Amino acid sequence: MAYMTSTGGAARTAPISRLSGLFTAFGARMEQYRTYRRTVNELTSLNDRELADLGINRSMIGSIATDAAYGAR
């Protein structure tokens, strides 16, 4: 009885899966950054009265956008 063992397939898939993981992580980080920029842009477009109605000072916009994009720390 003859059989065949292939060991090359696993060696080739490891770099591919690492590269795939790298692209997935990069995509997730880009989406977080887009959320950050979108939040900053929307809040800076509000006037001082509208921000005051929300209980936000202009100095708080960066930290609010960071929490929205990357989670509360």
Image: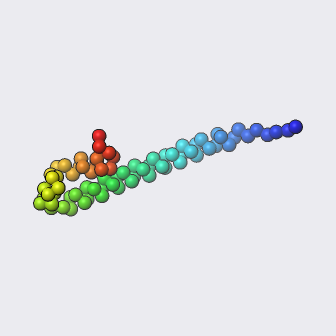
Is 53 on the left or on the right of 3, as rendered?
Answer: left
* Picture residue at 70% right of the left edge, 38% below the top: 7
Left or right? Give the position of 40 relative to 5. Answer: left
Residue 58 seen anywhere in this rendered image of the structure: no
Q: Quadrant of the C terminus?
A: top left
Q: Residue at x 25, y 60 (%)?
A: 42
Above or below, 42 against 5 in this view is below
Residue 28 on image: x %, y %: 42, 50
Colour convention of the picture: rainbow
Left or right of residue 27: residue 15: right
Rendered residue at 33%/54% (across/down)? 35
Residue 44: image location, x then y, percent: 21, 58
Q: Locate the N terminus and report the quarter of the image it occupies.
A: top right
Q: In the displayed image of the protein, which residue is found farthest to the right? A: 1
Figure quadrant of residue 5: top right
Q: Is residue 30 left or right of residue 38?
A: right
Q: Residue at x 85, y 38 (%)?
A: 2
Q: How many marks?
A: 0
Q: Is residue 70 visible?
A: yes
Closest to the observer: 68 or 36? 68
- Residue 4 lies in quadrant: top right
Q: Position of residue 40 (x, y in %)?
A: 25, 55
Q: Residue 26, how many percent across, how many down? A: 44, 49
